Structure formats: structure tokens, C-alpha cells
Image (cartoon, rainbow, N blue to C red):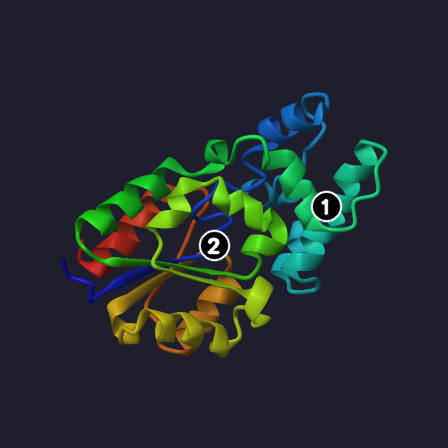
Amino acid sequence: MRKDRALILDFGGVVTRTLFETHDITEKALGLPVGSLSWMGPFDASTDPLWVSMQKREITEREYWRLRAAEVGRLLGEDWRDMQTFVRRARGADPELVVRPEARRAIREVREAGLRLAILSNELDLFYGADFRKRLPLIEEFDVVVDATYTGILKPDPKAYELVIAALGLPRENCVFVDDQRKNIEGAEAVALPCVHFDVMSPEESYDRALELLGV
């Protein structure tokens, strides 16, 4: 089996569906009335001024989700101070429900081709909790997981990309990085790491492009 190339994936939004796409699951899990969550991020920016502020880089991604978590907590009469509480309550019952089918397909094809897989995330365990990935067998398919929860080095810092490249032990030109945030793609481009800007509204096409670049 060849191990000379690798697909490097962001986690939230790329491997899993975004929280915008799973409002129905969240509302059911939290016992909220249907339609309680109406902010749609990239799917309808007109519903989400906070998202617009994040895209303008007026607030960080972590700040965006901290504010959303606090807002959802208030709907339940609770004080949520971090994103992990939100994600655990919204998605903890069955992690498999939120995995993108397109991600499963791409991961399978990469494995069948004998190539390597890595995750490069800013907040995998910070947002989801370490127990989440223990209950998600798909994570076992990845050879390398680099999580800024522990490294403290956030994309788009060049050091984040260098960490995952070093962990894979491959030339950067033999890797393809996929992320749904433009600033993180710009970070990859700055270190000459081949990349695909993942379109959450066209996940199949995004994965097809990444696999094409890998030669799969």
C-alpha cells in the first residue's frame, strides 16, 4: 500500500455537518420548539449578522461560537459559557448523525487508494470534548490528528500547517488540505500547502476536487 500522499481535513464543517445544517437535530436534542434556531451562517448571511462580522474578521470564530452558545443556553434558561457545552448537548446523543456522507465516501476512497489521512483542527476536543471522538469510530481512520486544543497553535498560523506536515512525514506537495474557512485556506497557501476551500453548500464537489488533486 502506498503511503506517499495524504488528505488533511479540518473537522467541523468538513467531516461533520455544520451546526447551521443540523438545527433540527439540535432543537430535538434540547427540547426546543421547531424554528427556535434561525441563524444560518453561510447558508443565508442575511439571518446572521454575527456570521458576517466573523467573515469580516471583526470577531474570531471562537468568539462567534461562544456568543451563539450563550444565546442557545439562554433559550433553556441556562448559563452556557463555552462552545463545548453547546456541542455536547446538541450532538452528544449520537455523533454519527452529523457526519457528512460525502466525508465518509472520501475517507473510504483515500483508504482504498492506500493514502494517508490527517485532521488539522483548531478546536476538535475544545468544542466536541475528548469523549466525542471516542464514540465516533470514523476518527480511527486517521493516521494523524493535530488539534490546537492541545498545541495552542491555531490556523492560520503557519506553524499549525507545519505541525501536521511534520507529523505525516511527507513533502507538502504530496498533501491536500481542506477547510471551510477562507482565512485558513489563505494560511495554507502562505506555506505552499496544496488546498481546497470547502464549500459547505457543495460538499460533494469540494471533496471531488480534493480527491482529484490527490490523484484518487
Q: Earlier in the sequence, mark 1 or mark 2?
A: 1
Q: Kindly identify which residue carries mark 1.
A: 68
Query: Which dot marks residue 174?
Result: none
In the displayed structure image, the side of residue 70 where residue 133 appears, left or right: left
Most foreground residue, 74 or 57:
74
Q: Amino acid at mark 1?
A: Arg
Task: Inspect this view and state whether residue 202 appears.
Answer: no
Q: Residue 101 at x, y = what percent?
A: 37, 36
Which secondary structure lies at badge 2?
loop
Say which quadrant the N terminus sits in. bottom left
Q: Residue 132 at x, y = what percent?
A: 54, 43
Q: Residue 196 at x, y = what percent?
A: 36, 59
Task: Inspect this view and state whether residue 155 appears.
Answer: yes
Q: Amino acid at mark 2?
A: Asp
Q: Residue at x 38, y 43 (%)?
A: 138
Q: Kindly identify which residue carries mark 2.
A: 180
Which secondary structure lies at badge 1?
helix
Q: Are marks 1 and 2 in contact (CB under 8 Å)?
A: no
Marker count (numbered): 2
How crowded pointer 2 is (Cα within 10 Å; few <14, some 14-19, many 20+) is rated as many
Q: Residue 97 at x, y = what percent?
A: 48, 31
Q: Quadrant of residue 204 in the image? A: top left
Q: CA distance from mark 1 to mark 2?
A: 19 Å
Q: Residue at x 46, y 34 (%)?
A: 96
In the displayed structure image, the side of residue 20 where residue 38 appears, left or right: right
How crowded pointer 1 is (Cα within 10 Å; few <14, some 14-19, many 20+) is rated as some
Q: Residue at x 41, y 48 (%)?
A: 139
Q: Residue at x 65, y 51 (%)?
A: 51
